[in-house]
Amino acid sequence: MKNQNVKRGRGRPKVFTNEELKNHKKTYMLNKEWYCDICKTGRNYTLAGKHCHLKTKRHKKNANN
């Protein structure tokens, strides 16, 4: 029993908890700015608002032209 090898997980050890990773992703999505080159509205959207903008009629109309 003394000479048995202990199995260790592969890769780097986990540093952050799942809750910390979730909070980091949330703050990144709310603080990262994004600009739509197709519409050229002059407005910087948050990365979270990017998906809402891509579904708008204005963006779809500009993308088809």
Image (cartoon, rainbow, N blue to C red):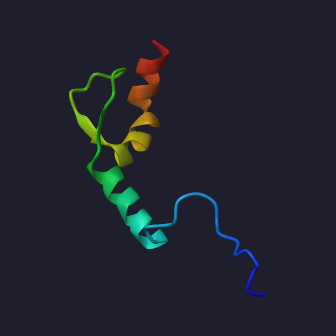
**Quick one: 32 or 61, which is closer to the camera?**
32
Rendered location of residue 40, percent (x, y): 28, 22
Quadrant where the image shows the C terminus: top left
Point out the residue furthest to the left here: 42
Rendered location of residue 28, percent (x, y): 33, 52
Quadrant where the image shows the N terminus: bottom right
Q: Residue at x 24, y 36 (%)?
A: 44
Compared to 31, does 38 lie above or below? above
Quadrant in which residue 59 is drawn: top left
Point out the residue furthest to the bottom here: 1
Q: Residue at x 40, y 57 (%)?
A: 25
Count all numbered tags in the image, as a single digit: 0
Point out the residue furthest to the top here: 65
Q: Residue at x 38, y 28 (%)?
A: 58
Quadrant in which residue 41 is drawn: top left
Q: Residue at x 37, y 48 (%)?
A: 48
Rendered location of residue 62, percent (x, y): 41, 19
Compared to 22, does 4 lie above or below? below
Rendered location of residue 18, percent (x, y): 48, 70
Compared to 58, does 15 lie above or below? below
**Quick one: 29 or 14, which is closer to the camera?**
14
Seen in the image, is 8 located left or right of residue 41? Answer: right
Compared to 2, does 19 lie above or below? above
